[in-house]
Amino acid sequence: MSTFLSNLKWRRAEKHFSPGHVDTSLIEKAIVNAPTSYGMQPFHVFRITSTRLKKALRPACHNQAQVTECYALFIFCARTNLEKRADEFLKAKQPPNIHSFMKSIVKFLKKRCGLSGNSDSTETDCDLSIEWAKRQAYIALGYGLAAATELKIASCPLEGFKPDEVKKVLNMDDKYEPCVLLAVGKKNNDYEQEPRFRFPADELIERIEYEDIK
């Protein structure tokens, strides 16, 4: 029986896709259910299947073929309005201990994201908060890739693009900052793929056993 771990050997960062529809509903479900700090999901994802928009986006993505050849192009964006997002999250979640939970989140945002909670926040504070939101978006990207792998849907993550130009094409609100793309579609077997290379586990993973800690 096919499993996720065995499918990892099948997965590649596809350079080309074949035309045709693929069902992305379970990939979207994985993205929605990905873990994030506090479960706050400080990101937004655009799913583009419009041929016209994908063609318009391709120059902003250094003319990468995957952008127009894929069936769906997911654009992961960090949210820049994190204090508002925290308010929305608290109103939607309504935890029993909402006041202590709110204090915990505010403290987290101030400490980890550089948000001061007032108009004196600096540009550095803003940069820190966006970087945190981007990391959460990358977790969601990983889950989307994992879902595509389990379903044997061809995929390719893309970091080579110009965020400002992507925003312009999509007329994107400033509360969103594009950080990574995910192209998914039908596998194309008509081009030669490079052999897979991975460093061995012993080179990548340093194991420190409990007994070794003095």
Image: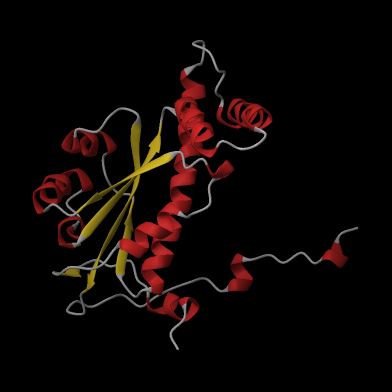
The answer to whether residue 36 is above or below residue 98 is below
In the rendered image, residue 165, in percent from the top left (x then y), is placed at 21, 36
49 and 169: which is toward the camera: 49
Which residue is depicted at the point 11% across and 50% down? 55
Res 179 quadrant in image: top left
User: What colour scheme governs how the chains and residues are painted in the rendered image of this protein?
Assistant: secondary structure
In the rendered image, residue 128, in percent from the top left (x then y), is placed at 51, 30
83 and 5: which is toward the camera: 83
- All told, the count of numbered labels is 0
Which residue is depicted at the point 23% across and 68% down? 22
191 and 88: which is toward the camera: 88
66 and 24: which is toward the camera: 24
In the rendered image, residue 98, in percent from the top left (x then y), is placed at 63, 31
Residue projecting furthest to the left: 52
Residue projecting furthest to the right: 214
Residue projecting furthest to the top: 120
Which residue is depicted at the point 49% across and 36% down? 92
The answer to whether residue 150 is above or below residue 92 is below
Residue 138 in the figure: left or right of residue 102: left
Image quadrant holding the N terminus, namely: bottom left
In the rendered image, residue 171, in percent from the top left (x then y), is placed at 19, 33
Image quadrant holding the C terminus, namely: bottom right
Which residue is depicted at the point 59% across and 72% down? 201
